[in-house]
Image (tube, helix red, strand yellow):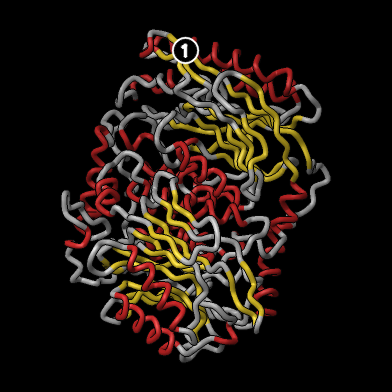
């Protein structure tokens, strides 16, 4: 693949042709290649007609035997102003993809253009020798549901023609592109020009072109090079998509999110067409989010204490109850002296801190659900409530929960007690290792119809409105799914508390990139408290640091505030500044949440893709997820429906059947 970062213009075919020719000579494979251009030079006021732009790209694609992708401001029939459109043109000159931009030109400070911000989008992909390609223009790559919808339309290589500028959130935007690759098991390629022209002046821009893959690695431009090349092993990607473990496009519970998106989708309408009107629209949209009603008891700045602790696990039912209490007292001892500080208003414990992750006994543990999970109220819950009262702090963490109203089941839940010891928040993990058959806990999606009938849809995404901000929780694996975090921040969440228990594996880097991206794309603090280690029965009661710790606080702009630089038992402090967060949410260039209207993508989430609901609505003893059977079935469905392309082992990319050139809705 060729990624160009030199400025280009419809008015100057010679310069771009020379660059493409030089790049083409460095590629030794014969046959058509894939090339990505940045967003075209010039302002919206210089926009060519759409036919002129596509004819220009077609001429170059034919000349250099390329599948050529780029975006440009263009004038389209029927529009009151220019718009950004991304195109993929085949070596024959045929336009395979036409993708209008969804979000406004936020990085540019808004422009005199129209966009499909409030319109249902059509998500299409097209086959090339490099793989199946889709386009997201500019900031649209920061819109997680749009990228997800494009993925389930069959896309393997997400092309992102852009124009980037350096500002406070430049690095976070670049990391978000890596996060999209991991979340969707895709390649994400971004091309951004290293300069633009304004009259006779050449304005330099930062190098921002990259190609990222699903483990979090990337190749990127370091300077003003005109182009670089990247080898895309599409058969490797296709093999990865056939593996159930960590296959997020298969695991994501789209049917759980879909009804909420359909209910909250706005009425389709045209966008503004003038910069002043975009700015006015932005100000009105962020005002309510940035300035929640003032509370007389508000504490705008405070310290948070994270208790990174070590737990004792057991595979013997008779030891589970004893271990829960033993682990609780040990954890309280670690953090108690820090929590007593008047500055500390929030204390967070990790996932599994009472039981260890090893406690459930196989994939069918419903007969001991009451031993695995604690209850609210209950002995351990009452002790945590007393700790909250004694320290005058809000207390959060992750536990296995047994609710007698759900006999034979237990949940992987996160709780918050207020500083008076009242339980004010209980969230039940939406995405868990249950889908792999390794944790036999119940998730709300597995019993979706009954769960929503009992509690209502809003109960899936609880947010606690407190003097220390609007608090939400998500547990461990949940962090990989941007839809879950967005479910909380759409309801006002400002601090996302993340109890977790993360092992050492190849996904570590991508998980961490995702953690920072969740903070950035939602303008919310992410407070991650990691499990610092376990004494595991499988290891003959030896201490293991399989759970890697690395607790951290991520600021609302995606930057790192503080981190525990290893495993082990320790307390760590961070700081929450709600006035700063709310000021950032009031900045119309940084509040991405303001533009999230499900009218754009709700149809994709209600199309029957993703992991189905109600897969464990029947007998709690019979685990339908054993041996990853549901994920394997979903992968087979994706193969049959054309969402995934099965690998051709040993086949060269150039020998793939590209005759379809098809678009998948």
Quarter of the image for the N terminus: give it.
bottom left
Q: Is residue 383 above or below residue 249?
A: above
Indicate left or right for 384 with 487 as reference: right
Q: Is residue 599 something one can see in this rendering?
A: no
Task: Return the x and y of residue 637 as percentages of the image width and height.
Answer: 22, 53
Task: Return the x and y of residue 648 as percentages of the image width and height.
Answer: 17, 53
Q: Residue at x 61, y 78 (%)?
A: 197
Quarter of the image for the C terminus: give it.
bottom left
Give the camera-side residue of 107 and 414: 107
Indicate left or right for 553 with 648 as reference: right
Q: Residue at x 43, y 43 (%)?
A: 451
Q: Is residue 348 above or below residue 92?
A: above
Task: Return the x and y of residue 241 as percentages of the image width and height.
Answer: 28, 48
Task: Return the x and y of residue 27 as percentages of the image width and height.
Answer: 31, 63
Q: Residue at x 46, y 43 (%)?
A: 510
Give the camera-side residue of 191 and 204: 204
Disc count in the image? 1
Q: Is residue 367 above or below residue 206?
A: above
**SS at circle 1:** strand
Give the camera-side residue of 64 and 247: 64
Q: Is residue 460 above or below residue 258?
A: above
Q: In the image as oriented, which residue stretches furthest toward the right?
A: 296
Q: Circle 1 sits on which residue? A: 543
Q: Is residue 561 something one can see in this rendering?
A: yes
Task: Report which quarter residue 624 is drawn in.
Answer: top left
Task: Report which quarter residue 207 is drawn in.
Answer: bottom right
Mark 1 Cα shell of 10 Å, populated few (<14), some (14-19), many (≥20): some
Indicate left or right for 624 with 103 as reference: left
Q: Residue at x 46, y 44 (%)?
A: 480
């Amino acid at each position: 693949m060729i990624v160009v970062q030199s400025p280009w213009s419809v008015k100057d075919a010679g310069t771009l042709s020379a660059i493409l020719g030089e790049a083409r000579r460095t590629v030794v494979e014969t046959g058509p290649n894939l090339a990505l251009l940045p967003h075209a030079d010039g302002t919206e006021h210089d926009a060519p007609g759409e036919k002129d732009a596509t004819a220009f790209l077609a001429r170059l694609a034919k000349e250099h035997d390329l599948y050529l992708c780029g975006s440009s401001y263009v004038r389209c029939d029927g529009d009151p102003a220019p718009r950004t459109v991304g195109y993929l043109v085949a070596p024959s000159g045929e336009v395979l993809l036409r993708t209008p931009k969804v979000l406004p030109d936020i990085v540019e400070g808004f422009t005199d253009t129209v966009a499909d911000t409030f319109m249902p989008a059509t998500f299409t992909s097209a086959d090339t020798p490099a793989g199946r390609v889709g386009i997201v223009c500019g900031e649209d790559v920061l819109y997680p549901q749009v990228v997800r919808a494009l993925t389930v339309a069959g896309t393997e290589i997400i092309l992102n023609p852009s124009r980037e500028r350096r500002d406070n959130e430049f690095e976070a935007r670049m990391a978000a592109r890596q996060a999209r690759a991991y979340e969707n098991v895709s390649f994400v390629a971004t091309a951004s020009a290293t300069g633009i022209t304004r009259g006779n002046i050449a304005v330099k821009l930062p190098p921002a072109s990259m190609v990222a893959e699903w483990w979090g690695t990337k190749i990127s431009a370091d300077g003003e090079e005109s182009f670089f090349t990247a080898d895309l092993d599409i058969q490797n990607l296709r093999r990865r998509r056939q593996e159930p473990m960590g296959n997020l496009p298969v695991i994501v519970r789209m049917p759980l999110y879909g009804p909420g998106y359909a209910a909250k989708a706005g009425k389709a309408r045209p966008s503004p067409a003038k910069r002043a009107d975009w700015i006015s629209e932005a100000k009105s949209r962020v005002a309510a989010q940035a300035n929640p009603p003032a509370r007389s008891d508000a504490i705008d700045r405070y310290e948070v204490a994270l208790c990174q602790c070590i737990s004792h696990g057991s595979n013997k039912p008779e030891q589970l109850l004893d271990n829960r209490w033993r682990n609780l007292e040990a954890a309280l001892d670690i953090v108690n002296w820090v929590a007593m500080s008047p500055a500390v208003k929030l204390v967070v414990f990790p996932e599994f801190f009472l039981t260890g992750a090893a406690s459930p006994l196989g994939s069918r543990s419903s007969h001991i659900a009451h031993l695995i999970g604690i209850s609210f109220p209950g002995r351990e819950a009452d002790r945590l409530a007393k700790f909250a009262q004694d320290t005058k702090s809000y207390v959060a963490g992750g536990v296995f929960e047994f609710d007698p109203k759900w006999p034979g089941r237990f949940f992987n839940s996160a709780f918050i007690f207020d500083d008076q010891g009242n339980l004010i928040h209980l969230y039940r993990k939406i995405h868990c290792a249950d889908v792999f058959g390794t944790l036999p806990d119940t998730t709300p999606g597995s019993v979706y119809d009954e769960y929503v009938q009992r509690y209502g849809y809003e109960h899936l995404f609880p947010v606690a409105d407190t003097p220390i901000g609007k608090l939400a929780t998500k547990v461990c694996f949940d962090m990989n799914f941007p839809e879950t975090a967005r479910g909380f921040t759409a309801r006002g969440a400002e601090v996302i508390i993340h109890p977790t228990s993360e092992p050492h594996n190849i996904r570590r880097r991508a998980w961490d990139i995702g953690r920072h991206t969740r903070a950035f794309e939602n303008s919310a603090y992410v407070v991650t408290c990691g499990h610092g280690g376990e004494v595991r029965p499988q290891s003959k009661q030896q201490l293991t640091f399989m759970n890697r710790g690395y607790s951290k606080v991520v600021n609302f702009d995606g930057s790192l505030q503080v981190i525990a630089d290893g495993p082990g038992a320790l307390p760590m402090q961070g700081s929450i500044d709600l006035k700063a967060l709310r000021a950032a949410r009031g900045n119309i260039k940084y509040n991405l949440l303001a533009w999230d209207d499900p009218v754009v993508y709700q149809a994709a989430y209600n199309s029957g893709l993703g992991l189905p609901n109600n897969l464990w609505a029947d007998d709690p003893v019979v685990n339908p997820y054993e041996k990853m059977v549901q994920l394997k079935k979903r992968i087979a469905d994706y193969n049959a429906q054309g969402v995934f392309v099965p690998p051709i082992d040993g086949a060269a990319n150039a020998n793939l059947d590209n005759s379809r050139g098809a678009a998948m809705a």
